[in-house]
Image: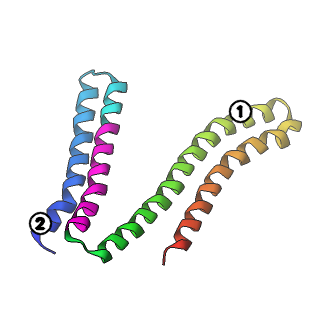
Amino acid sequence: MSVFDFLMMALPVVFLIASVLIAVKAVSRGRNRKRTLLMQLASFAFVFALCMVCPFAVSAATGDAAAAASGADGMAYIGAAAATGLSCIGGGIAVGNAAPAAIGATSEDPKAFGKAIIFVALGEGIALYGMLISIMILSKIG
């Protein structure tokens, strides 16, 4: 691995770490938290787009068909990771809101346990659907 390859791999990591440090410093100085969060998301989206576009641009410029096929596999892996990750985040939010309500309802009326636990299970089902989609995506690769 050449020094250039190492720098190209380390640059996004360094940029994101610097972005986090700048955001922490801005919040500690009393800046608007919502604006700082939006700037963090924008910087993450920029680095993500840069990391996604550069390999495709290089493979298109060189005309390498194997690199293009490898890029398609890479996009499938990213899609599988996004399906699992986003569904788990959504499921965590759903369970995080439903579980305390279910506990409260059960503490007031123990007969409500069966009805309340259904809503918690529905939130967990979201994560299972995302995992199922990622398994389907990964089964198509290869």
| x then y, percent, for residue 89 | 53, 46
Residue 17 relative to residue 123: left or right: left
Residue under label 1, please give it.
Answer: 101
Residue 88 relative to residue 121: left or right: left
Residue in the image at 41% along x and 62% along y:
75
Query: What secondary structure is the stretch in magenta mostly built from?
Result: helix
Residue 31 placement: quadrant? top left
Q: Amino acid at mark 1?
A: Ala
Residue in the image at 71% along x and 44% along y:
120
Q: Amino acid at mark 2?
A: Phe
The magenta region covers 41-61
| x then y, percent, for residue 33 | 35, 25
Residue under label 2, please give it.
Answer: 4
Residue in the image at 24% along x and 47% along y:
17
Q: Nearer the viewer, residue 29 or 22?
A: 22
Viewport quadrant of the N terminus = bottom left
Callout 2 crowding tier (Cα within 10 Å): few <14, some 14–19, many ≥20? few
